[in-house]
Image: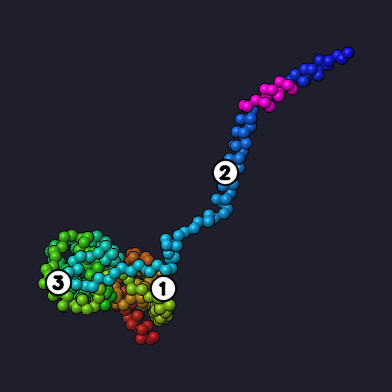
Amino acid sequence: MSIDNPKQSSGQEKQSFFVRNVWLSPVFYLYFLSVLIALGMLYINRENMVNRNSIPPDIKIDSSYYAPIREAPPVQAPAQKITVDNLLTPTKAELAHGESIFKMDCAPCHGLDGKGDGPAAASLNPKPRDYHATTGWVNGRLLSDMFKTVSDGIPGSAMVSFAGALSVNDRLDVIDYIRANFGNFPKDTPEQLEALNKKYHLEEVGEKSSAPAQLTLSVAMKQIEEGAIPRAKTVEQAMTYISSHMNDEGAQLFDSVTLNEQRALTMLASSGFWSKSEQNFVAVVTSDAAQNGFDPKVAQLSQQGWQTLYSYLKSIFLTTSIAS
């Protein structure tokens, strides 16, 4: 006769209940399967993240769509021959080129807005041209008239000839910029343009294109070196002369209106434009004075002060060029 253990019977009943209602329940397996799927997706996603961050994709590019950059031909702006027909039709590139020339060579006297109120205008007599005005033009307001002014200059004024400093293309581009931005200008007739063409041989000397000429690096470096060596020598001789003659009125005046004498002399030695006239000298010195080594207060010099400073520096450079 066996007597069942109540605790053992109770345990067997609980185990039987767990097996029937948990292990054998479809809900349990669905839950378990869902957990496995979720863990698998998480693992795959992490693997993809690792691959994207560490392994570059192996992308095959069809050769018919692949062209190495080194094989592509350089893009060049097509040159446009100067003709009577295209003189009055400047391109955007030509106007942009003309703007850069205007800001560098014209704005010091004529002002950025072309009103004749540049930083050098106060000391000039007669005053620089106000491009917005329609009267008082010496040569006239036609393109052909303005080209004559830029090319030949105006005697008795600060407007000198730019034929030696600017190419035909440069002169045409800066005139186009002025005409496009500073008022309504009259248009030339075909006969007037043809006369301009014949007088200055435009079709023979250039192409109407603002594309800059390009030099190889070696040629450019050689030109810079060849120009820099004698210029540095000239500046050194000029500084030596000035420092040894500080009792001179010109030396004392130069010292009082400069922030950096070497920079000022280097700027002047870089171009002979200023030495052509006192008006040119005033325009060059007062244009971005501090950047060029001069004290901005130099613009306050009297007419006699400008004459003294101009004569002194011109004689200095004449002396150093002879000594060289």
The image position of residue 59, as x and y in percent, is 50, 56
- Kindly report the secondary structure that dominates the magenta region of the rendered protein: helix
Task: Tell me if mark 3 has few (under 14), some (14-19) or many (20+) residues whose alpha carbon lies within 10 angstroms of its own.
Answer: many
Task: Tell me if mark 1 has few (under 14), some (14-19) or many (20+) residues whose alpha carbon lies within 10 angstroms of its own.
Answer: some
Query: Is residue 63 in view?
Result: yes
Task: Tell me if mark 2 has few (under 14), some (14-19) or many (20+) residues whose alpha carbon lies within 10 angstroms of its own.
Answer: few
Queried whether the magenta region covers residue 219, the answer comes back as no
Dot 2 and dot 3 residues touching (CB under 8 Å): no
Residue at the spot of label 3: 193
Residue type at tag 2: Asn
Distance (Cα) linking label 1 and label 2: 68 Å
Q: Earlier in the sequence, mark 1 or mark 2?
A: 2
- Relative placement, left or right, of 151 versus 35 is left
User: Considering the numbered disc 1 on the image, is that residue within a helix, a strand or a loop?
Assistant: helix
Q: Quadrant of the N terminus?
A: top right
Q: Quadrant of residue 261?
A: bottom left
Residue at the spot of label 2: 45
Distance (Cα) linking label 1 and label 3: 47 Å
Residue type at tag 1: Gln
Q: Quadrant of residue 30?
A: top right
Q: Which residues are magenta?
A: 15-27
Q: Nearer the viewer, mark 1 or mark 3?
A: 3
User: Considering the numbered disc 2 on the image, is that residue within a helix, a strand or a loop?
Assistant: helix
The image position of residue 92, as x and y in percent, is 26, 62
Residue 262 is marked as 1
Q: Nearer the viewer, residue 278 or 216?
A: 216
Dot 1 and dot 3 residues touching (CB under 8 Å): no
